[in-house]
Image: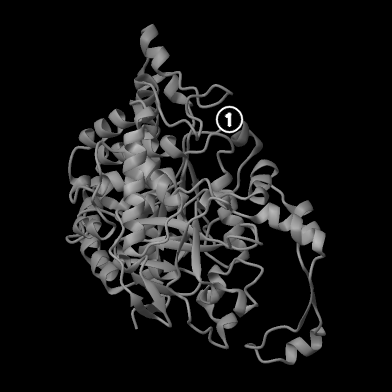
């Protein structure tokens, strides 16, 4: 078998965690001024989770990490997860095997140079000819090329100085001694036709070690992603893709269908959903259901939608610019008891989960898209029970609803029995959000503590550094960061910033972390105390 089946984490990640834990323990002792070394079971697993948002997310994540580095807290972090634009920053960082042990100014200058440069050369005849040659190479290798691959090449052209030959597995060099947090990139597997993202979505995580679909507990080596599989064995081995082609699918904002667009606009698809879907009725009486063995599926009556409804659904759910990838689950059979498997139930998320013939093992290809179609957040890999994450620093780089990512994640976790604390947000918080919020649940100490950092310009308007007020007119202008409004320079499809706008955003996101250092340190103390209490009980 060339597939690892099981819901645990791989041996390489276990070894990484062991090495990383020693560095985390030493760092926590220093920053918290602890009077003794932490025992192994007392060392918390801390993660950074970043949202998407194009160039805004890429720039902002760099600012947040700079602040953690200045506070000597970056070595406390064991995982960094990202989606969409935040994966662009992660890919830049992990090109250097020791990035978190160095000053990040060089990475920032590289980002500044590429964010502020004109993007017109990306669409020049020479660039288009290069893109075509790269796509031809992929086809010759055996890959199915698509607009997603073209988008990945465009990202590389716009955000890199030159062709990046690195692959995802090259990032293992950054983990060999536990010297950096483990990066995890998140995407979603959806249906290319007939279903909206709300109806069918499956989390897919990418790490330098493995690529896997969480719901099925099925993982392959990262270098095998793209190769052809059948019944768990590789049938055609393809060369590993350059990192830009993965960036294209991690941030594939173009594979949206009309139903997803409707949901994004009004946060509801109920009208079109009711109008176009098949009608499914449960036929079993409740008493009969209770007598059934737990592995049996419910008996259902399927009433297909009419021809007109099917045509409307086809228009609404078709993804004209998606990207297809060889499905490594193809040919595998679902176990008869799959619906009772805890791991499967934890991450089930489709209306087809009781129909094994409609699930991914029966599909020819995977259709991987940007997670922002459902939840613009990268929490799911950190919620796997086996990773035992104790604290998540949530960086939300959205411009509108500052709490949408954590609220939607909480709703998802409640529906799927995942551990996530209550998210209580007042009307005043929504109107005037602060720089940092701590969400925890004292009744459930095994739930992770969430430190949420929305993208806001609050005290930064008045202070250029924590406790240092702005005085001159120029300093006051530097505190004016236009995050809202029709003409904000930070809109998601804005790919080029001015030098001034880039500098303001990276300074703002850095400041928002630095200004809340006491809250971060106190939360770290609380997490350690929780672990100590749990071990003593």
Q: Is residue 238 left or right of residue 537?
A: left
Camera-side residue of 211 and 284: 211
The residue at the point 66 percent across, 62 percent down is: 194
Which image quarter is the N terminus in?
Answer: bottom left
Camera-side residue of 217 and 528: 217
Which image quarter is the C terminus in?
Answer: bottom left
Farthest residue, direction top: 473
Q: Is residue 301 visible?
A: yes
The residue at the point 49 percent across, 74 percent down is: 216
Q: Is residue 193 left or right of residue 270?
A: left
Q: Position of residue 535 (x, y in %)?
A: 36, 70
Secondary structure at badge 1 equals loop
Indicate whether 290 appears above or below 478: below
Q: Position of residue 122 (x, y in %)?
A: 36, 34
Indicate whether 398 appears above or below 423: above
Q: Position of residue 375 (x, y in %)?
A: 55, 51
User: Residue 350 is drawn in which quadrant?
Assistant: bottom right
Indicate whether 374 appears above or below 126: below
Looking at the picture, the colour scheme in use is one colour
Judging by the rendered image, the residue that carries numbered circle 1 is: 432
Q: Is residue 32 visible?
A: no
Q: Position of residue 227 (x, y in %)?
A: 35, 69
The residue at the point 51 percent across, 27 percent down is: 483
Camera-side residue of 16 and 201: 201
Count of picture labels: 1
Mark 1 crowdedness (10 Å alpha carbons): few <14, some 14-19, many ≥20:
few
Camera-side residue of 432 and 405: 405
User: Residue 469 is drawn in which quadrant?
Assistant: top left
Q: Is residue 126 left or right of residue 216?
A: left
């Amino acid at each position: 078998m060339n597939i690892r089946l099981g819901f645990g984490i791989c041996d390489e990640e276990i070894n990484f965690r062991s090495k990383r834990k020693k560095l985390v323990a030493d760092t926590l002792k220093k920053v918290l001024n602890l009077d003794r070394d932490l025992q192994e079971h007392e060392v918390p697993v801390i993660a950074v989770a970043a949202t998407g948002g194009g160039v805004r997310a890429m720039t902002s994540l760099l600012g947040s990490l700079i602040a953690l580095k200045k506070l000597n807290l970056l070595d406390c972090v064991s995982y960094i997860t990202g989606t969409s634009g935040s994966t662009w920053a992660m890919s830049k960082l992990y090109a250097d095997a020791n990035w978190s042990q160095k000053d990040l100014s060089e990475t920032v200058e590289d980002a500044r140079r590429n964010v502020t440069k004109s993007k017109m050369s990306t669409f020049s005849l020479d660039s288009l000819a290069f893109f075509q040659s790269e796509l031809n190479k992929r086809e010759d290798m055996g890959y199915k090329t698509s607009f997603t691959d073209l988008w990945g090449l465009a990202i590389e052209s716009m955000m890199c100085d030159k062709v990046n030959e690195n692959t995802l597995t090259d990032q293992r060099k950054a983990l060999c001694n536990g010297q950096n947090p483990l990066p995890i990139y998140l995407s979603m597997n959806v249906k290319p036709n007939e279903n909206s993202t709300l109806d069918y979505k499956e989390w897919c995580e990418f790490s330098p070690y493995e690529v896997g679909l969480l719901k099925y507990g099925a993982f392959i080596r990262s270098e095998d992603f793209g190769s052809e599989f059948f019944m768990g064995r590789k049938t055609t081995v393809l060369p590993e893709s350059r990192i830009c082609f993965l960036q294209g699918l991690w941030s594939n904002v173009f594979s949206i269908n009309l139903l997803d667009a409707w949901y994004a606009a009004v946060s509801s698809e109920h009208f079109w959903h009711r109008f176009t879907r098949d009608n499914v009725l449960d036929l079993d009486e409740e008493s009969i259901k209770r007598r059934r063995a737990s592995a049996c599926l419910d008996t259902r009556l399927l009433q297909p939608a009419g021809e007109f409804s099917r045509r409307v659904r086809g228009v609404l759910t078709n993804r004209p610019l998606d990207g297809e990838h060889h499905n490594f689950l193809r040919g595998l059979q679902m176990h008869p008891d799959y619906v009772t498997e805890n791991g499967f139930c934890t991450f089930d998320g489709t209306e087809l989960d009781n129909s094994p013939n409609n699930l991914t093992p029966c599909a020819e290809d995977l259709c991987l898209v940007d997670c922002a179609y459902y939840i613009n957040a990268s929490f799911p890999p950190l919620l796997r029970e086996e990773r035992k994450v104790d604290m998540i620093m949530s960086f939300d780089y959205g411009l509108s609803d500052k709490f949408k990512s954590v609220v939607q994640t909480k709703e998802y976790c409640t529906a799927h029995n995942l551990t996530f604390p209550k998210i209580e947000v007042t009307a005043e918080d929504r109107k005037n959000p602060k720089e940092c919020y701590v969400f925890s649940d004292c009744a459930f100490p095994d739930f992770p503590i969430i430190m949420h950092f929305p993208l806001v310009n609050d005290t930064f308007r008045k202070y250029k550094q924590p406790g240092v007020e702005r005085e001159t007119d120029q300093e006051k202008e530097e505190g004016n960061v236009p995050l809202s409004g029709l003409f904000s320079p930070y809109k998601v499809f804005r790919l080029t910033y001015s030098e001034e706008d880039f500098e303001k955003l990276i300074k703002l996101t850095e400041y928002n972390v630095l200004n809340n250092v006491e809250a971060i340190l106190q939360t770290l103390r609380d997490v350690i105390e929780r672990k100590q209490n749990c071990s003593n009980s």
